[in-house]
Image (cartoon, rainbow, N blue to C red):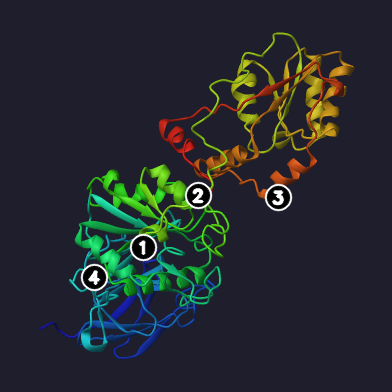
């Protein structure tokens, strides 16, 4: 039998000098306080109540705060008590503020921060009451539903994954959307009002999914949950809802939730890629035997009596990007016939093979680029003109149109060729550069990007995914450009107007593969 512990502490992982004693049989509240030095407003002052028992070498903890706390990767449910042992790790808020529980702690122990341990595949702590295992029970008729839920946080919270320990990796995957597919709001509102505002969308959801388990399918949910990453309250509410849904369905399920407008958000395939590369035990998925079910299918208004149009095409396009068979919820659960649906306005696989890259001249000239944000004008200018010796004049770099005019005039006086790489959507903005060319008797041509508005949005989304420093271009800016656009004409003073098709060039094969996917909801 273990001897009575001499002491017990919780020690901060990031700052090993921050040690908080837990006296024997005295409840200590851990949270936002001078003792922990935590000032995070999302942290409750009484986030966790912790009571050490030196005789049993255990610490009983009870989550009290609004936001989720964890132990060793498992979510602690508010209102329940858990028993922790020596070296168990607390996260006062999921993914943050980590503390190790240590008995018989000596001041020389662990002078340096220790690496985060791998999460175990079994429960290592118990409910204090009745010694019930710390898990969300999802009892299945065949016993396959019993398991422990564990949340993984990927890419700083851009992807959340909830996995039950009884989930089995398989070569066949039956994938589902969540909202509008497996569940709907109880209130009838379009968006859930709280974590409890949901019911199963069909009476036989559990039976259908249980039958798939019997046929050796792995059940996976892929859901877009925008705004969750940076809002602790929303994140906590979603996690509570997700765990409630999985418990209600009563079959082993793995859930992926994309929380930002990143590579993980459908219709982009980041969640699917993570499943195949990291969350299926290296078992290859047979696409021909797998399928995906979702309600964002592009169906128009009144596709069924009094039915509103689908909010997007995201689920249908996600299936297309992956290469999966696709069904709407009504087709899968009710056996309904397929109905007409919209097609995407832009297909990234059908792009022109060439633009006017051979239109460079050897004499001094001015080329005024015209194109909306995301049209690819800068890409074209840099790859086809600047690379051939043209001076690059750009307002984003120089700071103002006045600086652009000044640099243009200075370059022309040196007999250099110049490209004006701004949006230049109206006559007034173009006239500034035409006047300089006229003044110095230099030819001036206009290169107009033919990129459609939806293609521009696709380009913007691609840059947002592949370049973390890129500032996304909002709908307001694109719409403003379109509203104020004046088509260039020769009479403005141009010697020639050239239409330019956007032809992308890629840094690697992965970028090319991504670009040719459907990226827009």
Give the residue at mark 3: 476
Give the residue at mark 2: 340
Give the residue at mark 1: 333
User: In the drawing, does residue 214 fall left or right of residue 232?
Assistant: left
Mark toward the start of the polypeptide (4 vs 3): 4
Gap in Å between the C-alphas at discs 4 and 3? Answer: 48 Å
Judged by depth in the image, the label closer to the viewer, 2 or 3, is 2
Gap in Å between the C-alphas at discs 1 and 3? Answer: 40 Å
Secondary structure under tag 4 reads: loop
Secondary structure under tag 2 reads: loop
Gap in Å between the C-alphas at discs 1 and 2? Answer: 18 Å
Judged by depth in the image, the label closer to the viewer, 4 or 2, is 2
Visible residue check, residue 275: yes
Secondary structure under tag 1 reads: helix
- Residue 31, image quadrant: bottom left
Please say if the residues under marks 1 and 3 sit with CB atoms less than 8 Å apart: no
Gap in Å between the C-alphas at discs 1 and 4? Answer: 21 Å
Rate crowding at label 3 as few (under 14), some (14 to 19) or many (20 or more) other CA atoms within 10 Å.
few
- The answer to whether 318 is drawn above or below residue 122 in the figure is above
Residue at coordinates 56% horizontally, 65% vertically from top-left?
A: 306
Mark toward the start of the polypeptide (2 vs 3): 2
Give the residue at mark 4: 145
- The answer to whether 332 is drawn above or below residue 91 in the figure is above
| Closer-to-camera residue (190/360) | 190
Rate crowding at label 4 as few (under 14), some (14 to 19) or many (20 or more) other CA atoms within 10 Å.
many
Judged by depth in the image, the label closer to the viewer, 1 or 4, is 1
Residue at coordinates 47% horizontally, 30% vertically from top-left?
A: 507
Q: Which mark is residue 455?
A: none
Judged by depth in the image, the label closer to the viewer, 1 or 3, is 1
Judged by depth in the image, the label closer to the viewer, 1 or 2, is 2
């Amino acid at each position: 039998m273990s001897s009575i512990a001499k002491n017990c502490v919780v020690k901060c992982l990031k700052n090993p000098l921050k040690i908080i004693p837990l006296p024997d049989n005295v409840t200590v509240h851990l949270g936002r306080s001078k003792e922990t030095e935590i000032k995070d407003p999302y942290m409750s002052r009484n986030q966790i109540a912790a009571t050490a028992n030196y005789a049993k070498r255990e610490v009983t903890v009870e989550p009290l705060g609004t936001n989720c706390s964890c132990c060793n990767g498992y979510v602690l449910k508010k209102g329940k008590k858990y028993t922790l042992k020596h070296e168990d790790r607390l996260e006062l808020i999921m993914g943050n503020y980590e503390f190790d529980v240590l008995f018989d702690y000596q001041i020389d122990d662990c002078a340096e921060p220790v690496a985060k341990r791998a999460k175990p595949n079994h429960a290592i702590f118990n409910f204090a009451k009745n010694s019930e295992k710390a898990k969300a029970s999802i009892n299945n008729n065949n016993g396959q539903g019993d398991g422990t839920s564990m949340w993984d946080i990927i890419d700083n919270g851009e992807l959340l994954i909830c996995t039950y320990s009884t989930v089995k990796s398989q070569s066949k995957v039956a994938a589902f959307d969540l909202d509008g597919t497996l569940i709907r709001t109880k209130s009838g509102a379009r968006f859930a009002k709280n974590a409890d505002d949901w019911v199963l969308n069909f009476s036989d959801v559990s039976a259908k999914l249980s039958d798939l388990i019997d046929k050796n399918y792995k059940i996976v949910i892929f859901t877009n949950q925008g705004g969750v990453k940076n809002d602790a309250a929303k994140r906590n509410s979603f996690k509570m809802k997700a765990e409630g849904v999985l418990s209600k369905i009563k079959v082993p399920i793995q859930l992926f939730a994309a929380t930002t407008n990143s590579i993980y958000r459908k219709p982009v395939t980041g969640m699917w890629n993570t499943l195949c590369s990291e969350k299926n035990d290296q078992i290859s998925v047979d696409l021909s035997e797998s399928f995906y079910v979702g309600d964002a299918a592009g169906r128009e208004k009144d596709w069924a009596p009094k039915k509103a149009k689908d909010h997007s095409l995201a689920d249908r396009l996600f299936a297309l990007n992956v290469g999966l068979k696709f069904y709407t919820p009504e087709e899968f659960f009710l056996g309904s016939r397929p109905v007409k649906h919209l097609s995407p306005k832009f297909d990234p696989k059908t792009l022109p093979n060439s633009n006017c890259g051979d239109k460079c001249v050897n004499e001094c000239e001015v080329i005024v680029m015209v194109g909306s944000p995301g049209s690819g004008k800068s890409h074209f200018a840099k790859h086809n003109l600047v690379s051939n010796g043209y001076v690059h004049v750009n307002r984003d770099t120089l700071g103002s149109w006045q600086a652009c005019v000044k640099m243009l005039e200075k370059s022309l006086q040196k007999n250099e060729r110049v490209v004006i790489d701004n949006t230049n959507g109206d006559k007034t903005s173009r006239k500034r550069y035409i006047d300089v060319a006229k003044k110095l008797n230099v030819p001036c041509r206009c290169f107009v990007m033919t990129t459609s508005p939806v293609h521009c949005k696709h380009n913007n989304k691609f840059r947002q995914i592949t370049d973390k420093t890129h500032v996304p271009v909002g709908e307001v800016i694109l719409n403003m450009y379109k509203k104020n656009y004046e088509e260039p004409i020769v009479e403005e003073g141009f010697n020639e107007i050239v239409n330019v098709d956007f032809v992308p060039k890629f840094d690697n094969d992965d970028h090319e593969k991504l670009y040719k996917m459907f990226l827009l909801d």
